[in-house]
Amino acid sequence: MPESNDLPIAPVAKKVKHFVKFGIVDGENRGKNPMNPPLEKFDPYYWMRDDSRKNEEIINHLKLENEYTRKVTDSLESSRETIYEELLSHIQETDTSAAVPYGKYEYYSHTIEGLSYSIHCRRNKEIKNSLEEVILDENELAKKLGTTQMNVGGLRISPSQNLLAYSVDTTGYETYEISIIDLSNHELICKIPNVAGFEWGSDDETIYYTKMDAAHRPYQVWKNKLNKSNNLIYEEDDELFWVGLSKTFDRELLLIGSGSKETSEVSFIDLSSNLDNLTIVKKRAQGVLYSISKRNDIFYIVTNAENAKNFQVLIAKIDEPNNWKPFVDITGKIIFNNDENRSISHTNSFQHFLMIFGREKGLKQAWCINFDEDTALDFHQLEFPESAYVVGMGSNMEYDSNKVRITYSSMITPHTIFDYTVSNKELELVKQKNVPNFNQLEYETKRVYAPSKDGIMIPMSIVYRKDFHLDGINNSKLMLYGYGSYGSCVEPRFNSGILPMLDRGIVYCIAHIRGGSEMGRSWYEDHGKYLTKKNTFEDFCSCAEFLIEQEWTTPENIAIEGRSAGGLLMGAVLNMRPDLFNVAIAGVPFVDVMTTMCDPSIPLTVVEWEEWGNPNEEKYFDYINSYSPIDNVVKQRYPNILITTGLHDPRVAYWEGMKWCATLREKATPDSGLILLKTDIEAGHFSASDRYKYLREKAFEYAFLFDRLNL
């Protein structure tokens, strides 16, 4: 890459006088207690916002930024190609997923070398050597639709298994169209546009689906009798709440969940009835979250009700759904009550057993209750050989089964699928993902803890290649990854995409900072949101400081990465401690917190008030303004920064990264590193849907990273 004095001239964005208003605005939902009179903030780059994504001046500026980024990184082309080949070398391009049984069929999918998307198939398992039936070829569909962005939102087999419904988004904006086809002849029966999610009813004639409002919020449930009728059956008026659909695993009830970040309410429809009568499990109460699964006539309810911070499991009869009682075994002992050392996330009900998933000691765990035991409930935890791992629910389609399919991995164990037989507590290996050119024995993983500013110990999951560190990890190149929002956990799971880093001696670290819920819900609710959000950023800096103090690395050897709300993390820590880092990769970064969170017309804004707070209210205005990345860029030296955005992203709009880049360029001192913006004009929040294009995007990021780390 050229030296700084040989670089082409970076685009300079114009500045236009504009003031953003915080507080009361006539005709707008500005929250419960907006400031009156309102305050104003100068925003010279507000002009970059275009909800239509068609403004020629804006598109041209993004293309100028892309061209500048291309010119600056032209010398890395051979490096990008090498890295791309490395990434590809760790993927078995032609592969078949583990078959999932469902009645007389088993369902699976293929990926084929050279093809970008999956091919979904089934086979009649009752007929020996039965022919494979292709039910959906995403590659052919992409050709037919003439699109380079192919996002299949869901595939649903009808109750008779004679029809297939699938949803597709071709823009990345996450608005889908359902197509229903007859699998006997692959003829199209009907299409339903502008859909968020969907489920079949009790027969092949009925689809239930959700629609979104102008703010991209799923808020209505519709019942569609194919080519016959289309009726609204539920509408959520509160802008804080999103609506979702699911079915109980026995397929008897349709569940309509309406939830905000802090409150939820579930209603259900008996699918055996022709009437769409909704029954509420329990009416919403501020701060009470719950989810349900069903077995026979019992609901199993995971909830934080009754001050169960880490959630507990309660039960209720279906005919008395709001009469919640403790979950007890035959001896009367309460099980899965609130526990400060264990948090519960959800349950999955089967005919003969119940699966419970949660966390203990910072790691995901799974428990099983076998209802076929004659005495006390056989409650046990699934056991695995490694000390740090990720376990989750696999693909299960049969309710009346003696097995449950689960997934498992660790930072050095590839994605593995097991069938767990409940009666004898045995794990049967179904399939482990083949990772070519990878030898598990060459790598090692550790878990270490860094003291935070207020003395809390922050866990970090670490993986590295052993032969680069035979004498210990000393002043190594290091990638520190973080997220830390919404209570979401960054799990220590296997990721073949980081092998090019490990194979160059880079130590890869995940910082499990507050704002996630790795160490229980308090890690998030009490220490990582609202007026404690800065803990997230300070924890990340503490992790970097610890790694430097322990001589694992040095500031010139540290790279950092985060996406979406993790991009907020990048923006905040780069303002706070730019001296700690050499290079940062910020993917679809949420960095314009003040301006975005004051405007209810932007998708996600209103529902996010229960995450960050509402800057239209005096209580939150100053606090959010003190960390919002764009609003805290100052004249100082910034490290190398690569910002990536997607033009059609509805979650974090492209203009956030665009405005941040312009602000950084305006204020960064001349001794700062490179500040680059790269926008995918065809993509949304989740990058390229084409698996080969996705790898090329990743190779671009790594080439920049390795160059800046002098690798």
Image (cartoon, rainbow, N blue to C red):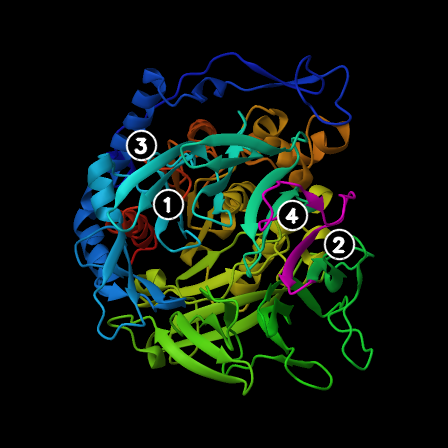
Label 4 Cα neighbours within 10 Å, binned few <14 / some 14-19 / many ≥20: many
Identify the mark nearer the N-term, 3 or 2.
2
Report helix, strand or loop for mark 2.
Answer: loop
- Of labels 3 and 1, earlier in sequence is 1
Q: Nearer the viewer, residue 100 or 673?
A: 100
Pointer 3 residue: 681
1 on left or right of 672: left
Residue 321, labelled with which disc?
A: 2
The amino acid type, in three-letter code, at marker 3 is Ile
What is the C-alpha distance between the residues marked 3 and 4? 41 Å
Residue 323 within the segment the image draws in magenta: no
- Tell me if label 2 and label 4 are in contact, CB under 8 Å: yes
As rendered, which of 302 and 53 lies closer to the eye? 302
Residue type for callout 2: Pro
Tag 3 secondary structure: loop
Give the left or right position of residue 496, taking residue 277 as reference: left
User: Of helix, strand and loop, which one carries label 4?
Assistant: strand
Point out residue 465 in the picture as x, y percentages from the top left corner: 36, 73
